[in-house]
Image (tube, rainbow, N blue to C red):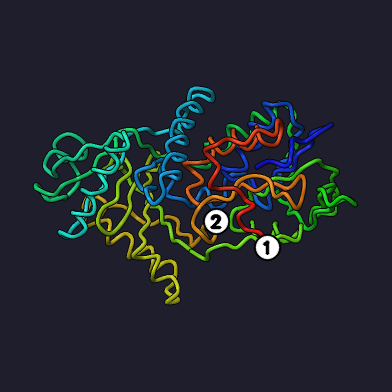
């Protein structure tokens, strides 16, 4: 459902310039809107930089409509790479996943069957085949079943954000970085009229897009809206390596590993995330990530931990995206989701169409912001 397109000057404030805000703003600018990018930090340096940054739909099978949206996100990434040029942000090298106990292996093979029935490319290999043809540095057992999804990718989030934001600014978008939104003003009819920044500047706007990631609930509160979010922190560590021994993203039994450009590897693990609330220091969490990674990639023994961050993931309470207009506040739109790396290019395009032309894409039918009434 849409409350209608933005009229007149079409000046839109995009609050939050991670990957979602960048893509929404860029698509709005392409459609002629006057865009103001607003972020308390610098573009792409928040959750986008501290994400595993895996472009996929194989991990999105809880609901078919969510899977389909992520498949569309993967296609939109390929289109984005064609449009922007792949540069150093786009790495379509596929993804590997395997398990280390019979029950988990059985679930993995069930997932492979489901994906194949939905026409998603997935290949079941053995560990020996993976080492021979894809990743010789792994210690995956010879007979272990390994899922290889060749159409998946990883991206360098901060570099990706820089390109559409830079192009949008070159074409007239206004940057407001290093300042936060502290108030959103509405008119007598309840529609968005102004945005006030923490540095005192007051902007007259026709619409705002709440793409504020972990701060999205606070921004929603500025228009009197309750956006329920799921508290789910995650820890990500980066390793410095003289030589990066792997070529693609992978889920080993206890840790996720991917390259991160020259001389760097990214680690994440839900097992280690579960320890965050034990008050373990980030350095200790990073050490555990490193130790888990060594079981799968022994060559990482010569690497060192260079960066660690515990970051809050921007997940609406039901786990699914909140995208689009909120009918009770004309001119207010949301773009809040987990898996923002995969979904940003497609959500950016769809939301821009909704804002400018009032056209709501059917792929977003299950993910409207209005399902959180409050």
Residue closest to the eye, 121 or 327: 327
Name the residue: 45% across, 43% down: 65
Please rate how many residues cluster around mark 1, counting C-alpha atoms within 10 Å: few if below 14, some from 14 to 19, many from 20: few
In percent of width and height, residue 178 lies at 71, 50
Q: Is residue 222 left or right of residue 136?
A: right
| Disc 1 target residue | 374
Residue closest to the eye, 89 or 92: 92
Nearer mark to the viewer, of 2 and 1: 1
- Of callouts 2 and 1, which one flags the residue occurring earlier in the amino acid sequence? 2
Please rate how many residues cluster around mark 2, counting C-alpha atoms within 10 Å: few if below 14, some from 14 to 19, many from 20: many
Q: Are marks 2 and 1 in contact (CB under 8 Å)?
A: no
Farthest residue, direction bottom: 278
Name the residue: 11% across, 42% down: 128
In percent of width and height, residue 66 lies at 45, 45
Which corner quadrant holds the C terminus? bottom right
| Disc 2 target residue | 314
- Between the C-alphas of marks 2 and 1, the distance is 19 Å
Q: Is residue 90 above or below residue 249?
A: above
Task: Find residue 242 and report its image quarter.
Answer: top left
Q: Is residue 345 above or below residue 372?
A: above
Residue closest to the eye, 207 or 366: 366
Which corner quadrant holds the N terminus? top right
Farthest residue, direction right: 188
Q: Is residue 85 left or right of residue 10?
A: left
Q: Is residue 221 above or below residue 46?
A: below
């Amino acid at each position: 459902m849409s409350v209608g397109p933005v009229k007149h000057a079409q000046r839109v404030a995009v609050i939050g310039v991670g990957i979602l805000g960048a893509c929404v703003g860029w698509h709005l600018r392409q459609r002629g809107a006057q865009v103001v990018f607003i972020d308390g930090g610098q573009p792409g340096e928040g959750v986008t930089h501290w994400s595993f940054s895996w472009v996929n739909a194989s991990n999105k099978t809880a609901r078919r409509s969510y899977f389909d949206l992520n498949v569309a996100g993967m296609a939109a990434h390929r289109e984005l790479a064609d449009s922007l040029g792949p540069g150093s942000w786009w790495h379509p090298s596929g993804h590997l996943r395997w398990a280390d106990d019979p029950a988990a292996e059985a679930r993995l093979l069930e997932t492979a069957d489901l994906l194949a029935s939905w026409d998603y490319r997935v290949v079941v290999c053995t560990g020996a085949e993976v080492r021979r043809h894809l990743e010789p540095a792994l210690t995956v057992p010879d007979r272990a079943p390994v899922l290889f999804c060749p159409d998946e990718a990883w991206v360098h989030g901060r570099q990706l954000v820089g390109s559409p934001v830079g192009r949008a600014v070159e074409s007239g978008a206004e940057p407001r970085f290093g300042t936060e939104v502290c108030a959103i003003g509405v008119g007598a009819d309840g529609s968005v009229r102004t945005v006030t920044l923490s540095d005192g500047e007051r902007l007259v706007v026709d619409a705002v897009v709440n793409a504020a990631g972990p701060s999205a609930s606070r921004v929603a509160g500025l228009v009197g809206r309750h956006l329920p979010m799921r508290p789910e922190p995650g820890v990500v560590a980066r390793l410095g390596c003289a030589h990066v021994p792997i070529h693609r993203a992978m889920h080993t039994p206890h840790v996720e590993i991917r390259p991160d450009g020259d001389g760097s590897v990214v680690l994440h693990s839900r097992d280690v995330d579960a320890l965050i609330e034990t008050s373990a220091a980030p350095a200790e969490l990073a050490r555990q990530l490193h130790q888990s990674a060594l079981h799968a990639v022994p060559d990482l023994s010569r690497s060192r931990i260079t960066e660690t961050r515990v970051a809050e993931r921007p997940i609406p309470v039901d786990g699914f995206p909140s995208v689009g207009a909120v009918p009770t506040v004309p001119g207010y739109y949301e773009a809040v989701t987990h898996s923002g790396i995969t979904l940003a290019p497609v959500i950016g395009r769809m939301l821009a169409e909704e804002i400018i032309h009032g056209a709501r894409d059917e792929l977003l039918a299950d993910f409207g912001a209005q399902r959180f009434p409050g």
